[in-house]
Image: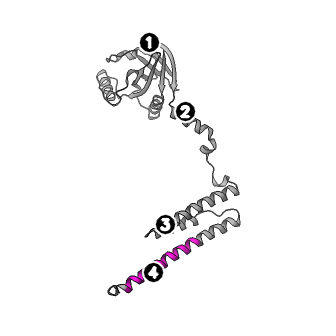
Amino acid sequence: MIVELHSDVLLHVSDLFARGVKNKFGLLLGYGLDDRLVVVKPIELAQVDPQYLEKRYSLFKDVYPNLSLVGVYEIGGNNPDRVNMLDISFEPRLYLSVDESIQFKSFVEGNLVKTVIESSETEVITTKTIDSSKDYTKGRSKEDLTVAEFNQNMTSTLTKLYERLNKILETEGMDREIVEIANALRCYKHVKQPTDTKLQVAELALITEQIAELESAKIGIAKKILVKEPGLV
């Protein structure tokens, strides 16, 4: 017999340690196969009382109808007989002991059996992706970038801002956002090469010119309205 723990059990136990929960006794939901018990969901208990245990189990059974009670867990305990305090009938009966270093021991019907941690397909993919992309997880500051990398990042950023600006100019009433983009560009630090500074100045000049054209167009529209509606003057 093998006891297979899903990741929710590890997260649950870690959370109990982090919160310093006094009562470290709870129920385990899962299902049985021919050669193993699969533990899927742990249930935290506020108190150890037979009636409370049964009520708590009934609530979770409605939420997880495909799972059954397979046993109990206890942090800091090492007494497999504790599983017999449950009045609920189920078998085989699992007692999962967890020590202070979060090491698991599984007892089925009082006998020590092998415990394995089962990872879902999503968890395996995530772990492999993180491990194979260590540079991505570490990140790099601007100070660590080379001049070429900084220039490339700046060019990409300015290009995206310019594309966004063109879209904004096609929409009426977006003057404020244009000014915000111009201010954002001004907040960029000066780079190491004069050519990069010139690039920023050129982009800012372009934005200023486009804002002026937008304002001029609006003034022209306003004048036409006033000419057609003399009563407004």
Which residue position is annotated with label 2? 124
| Label at residue 110 | 1
| Residue found at x 40% / y 16% | 93
Q: Is residue 97 left or right of residue 135?
A: left
Quadrant of image for the C terminus: bottom left
| Residue positioned 63% across, 49% down in the render | 140
Q: Secondary structure at mark 4?
A: helix
**Is residue 213 located in the magenta-colored stretch of the structure?**
yes
Q: Work out how far the residue at label 1 is from the one at label 4, CA to CA, in angstroms.
A: 87 Å
- At label 1, which amino acid type do we have? Gly
Callout 2 amino acid = Val
Q: Nearer the viewer, mark 2 or mark 3?
A: 3
Comes first in the chain, label 1 or label 4: 1
Whether residue 34 is in magenta: the answer is: no
Residue picked out by circle 3: 168
Secondary structure type for disc 2 = helix
Residue for badge 4:
219
Q: CA distance from mark 2 to mark 1?
A: 32 Å
Is 141 above or below relative to 62? below
Percent x, y of residue 154:
63, 60
Q: Tell me the kind of residue under disc 4.
A: Ile
